[in-house]
Image (tube, grey):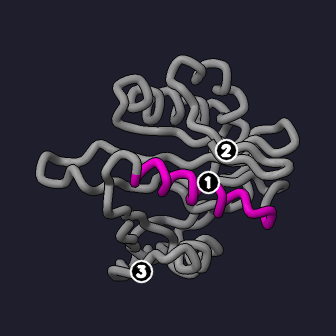
């Protein structure tokens, strides 16, 4: 789909999911261990990571309601993001971004931006004209989304628990019209 000199971005076909499961589990586990606020809290083991992919992502890949974009950098799985197309009947024009993650060893290489650009390109091809997402307020992803043209719809205080403590963090709800 998209390729730079060292990074390839593609949509993972549902039938290839089992081939990637170990790498996906390792990727998510590493991101949560590094403090990523993506719905999980410590302790978070590799079994928890594998269960997430199998229970929450694989069914949507199988039925076509979710697309999984993967980034391979220098031959290794370096990042992923999901495009959730499972919207109500009155919202066929909308999709949601879920779990943009980049391995801590591969950050600051433009991988997150490339994943988001590929996601938006595919959303347009599927006649989706509005993309929504949420991110921990003040997190490193928020400026990325803003630089890609996402606008803040609002901030919800005390939305989710911090990955490593009982602190409650705010979340920023963002959107982009394609």
Front residue of 146/129: it is 129
| Labels 3, 2: front one | 2
What residue did someone put label 1 on? 115
Q: Are marks 1 and 2 in contact (CB under 8 Å)?
A: yes
Q: Residue 123 magenta-drawn? A: yes
Distance, label 1 to label 2, CA atoms, is 7 Å
Furthest residue in direction front, as rendered = 125
In the picture shown, does residue 87 fall above or below 68? below
Q: Secondary structure at mark 1?
A: helix
Query: Can you tell which mark lies on residue 154?
Result: none
Instruction: Specify few, some or many for label 3: CA neighbours under 10 Å numbering under 14, 14-19, or 20 or more.
Output: some
- Residue 107 locus on image (x, y percent): 78, 61
* Region in magenta: 108-124
The residue that label 3 is drawn on is: 151
Residues 117 and 40: in front is: 117
User: Do we see residue 28 in this rendering?
Assistant: no
Quarter of the picture containing the C terminus is: bottom left
Q: Where in the figure is residue 122, as x and y percent of width and height?
A: 46, 48
């Amino acid at each position: 789909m998209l390729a730079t000199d060292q990074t390839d971005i593609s949509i993972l076909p549902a039938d290839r999911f089992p081939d990637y499961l170990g790498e996906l589990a390792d990727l998510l586990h590493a991101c949560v261990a590094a403090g990523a606020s993506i719905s999980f809290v410590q302790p978070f083991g590799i079994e928890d990571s594998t269960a997430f992919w199998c229970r929450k992502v694989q069914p949507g890949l199988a039925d076509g309601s979710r697309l999984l974009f993967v980034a391979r950098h220098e031959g290794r799985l370096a990042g992923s993001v999901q495009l959730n197309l499972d919207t109500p009947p009155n919202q066929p024009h909308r999709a949601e971004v879920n779990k943009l993650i980049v391995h801590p060893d591969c950050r600051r290489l433009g991988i997150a931006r490339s994943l988001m650009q590929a996601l938006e390109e595919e959303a347009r091809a599927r006649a989706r004209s509005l993309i929504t997402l949420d991110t921990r307020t003040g997190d490193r992803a928020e400026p990325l989304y803003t630089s890609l043209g996402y606008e803040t719809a609002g901030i919800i205080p005390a939305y989710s628990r911090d990955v490593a403590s009982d602190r409650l963090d705010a979340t920023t709800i963002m959107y982009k019209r394609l």
